[in-house]
Image (tube, rainbow, N blue to C red):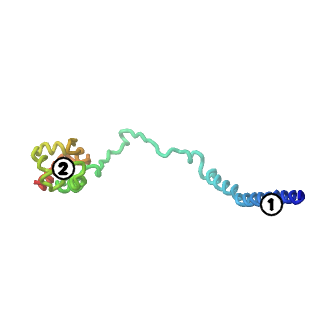
Amino acid sequence: MTKKSYAMHVAMILGASAVLLLFIFVLVAHHRGIPERVRLDRGALLSTASSVAERIKPVGQVSILSAETRPEPVKIAAAAASPGRDGQQVYQASCVVCHGAGIAGAPKLGDKGQWAKPIAKGLNTLYASAVNGMQGSAGVMPAKGGNPALSDAEVKAAVDYMVAQSK
């Protein structure tokens, strides 16, 4: 019985060794091409076409120009509101978001009941609230409806439009 036990142990050890050896062969075969891939990757970085100075150069540079070489300032047309917009156009572009849905306590356009109290306070109060913004128990109104590109005249035209639609 001891010879059988001994033979069984030897067979198990040889079997485990064979499995381990097979695993090592598969592992080596799988990783055999790695040094070549590393060499190719390093070759792209270390090639003579790109020097170290080119690879580490800054992304941008600051240029200080003298008064003679400085170009004239460019006016940003997109930030400025287009002249000649009437109240309805301003309302459609900026005000409809809150006054169309009644968000943050904004009176809905055309709702006479909601507009009665603000209209009773007078147009100058409405203009001041619209241009400068306000925060009260009824809700919040950001300055110029949250669009700082609007002129005071455009905001007043939008207020006039909303009041006319809500009387």
Residue 107 is marked as none
Foreground label between 1 and 2 = 1
Work out which quarter of the rendered image holds the C terminus and state it: bottom left
Task: Check disc 2 and report its element: helix, strand or loop.
Answer: helix
Q: How many marks?
A: 2
At 16% from the left and 50% from the top, the residue drawn is 159
Amino acid residing under circle 1: Gly
Rendering coords of residue 33 (x, y %): 70, 59
Residue at the spot of label 2? 154
Rendering coords of residue 86 (x, y %): 17, 55
Residue at the spot of label 1? 15
At 89% from the left and 59% from the top, the residue drawn is 1
In three-dimensional space, the C-alpha distance between marks 1 and 2, rounded to whole angstroms, equals 89 Å
Rendering coords of residue 69 (x, y %): 38, 42
| Residue 8 or residue 78, whichever sits in front | 8
Task: Check disc 1 and report its element: helix, strand or loop.
Answer: helix
Does residue 77 appear left or right of residue 110 in this picture?
A: right
In this picture, is 82 found above or below 125? below
Amino acid residing under circle 2: Glu
Rendering coords of residue 58 (x, y %): 51, 44
| Residue 157 or residue 119, whichever sits in front | 119
Furthest-front residue in this view: 1
**Crowdedness near tag 2: few (<14), some (14–19) or many (≥20) residues, C-alpha within 10 Å:** many
Furthest-right residue in this view: 3
Say whether disc 1 or disc 2 marks the residue closer to the N-terminus: 1
Q: Are marks 1 and 2 in contact (CB under 8 Å)?
A: no
**Crowdedness near tag 1: few (<14), some (14–19) or many (≥20) residues, C-alpha within 10 Å:** few
| Residue 14 or residue 95, whichever sits in front | 14
| Residue 55 or residue 32, whichever sits in front | 32
Does residue 136 appear left or right of residue 62 in this picture?
A: left
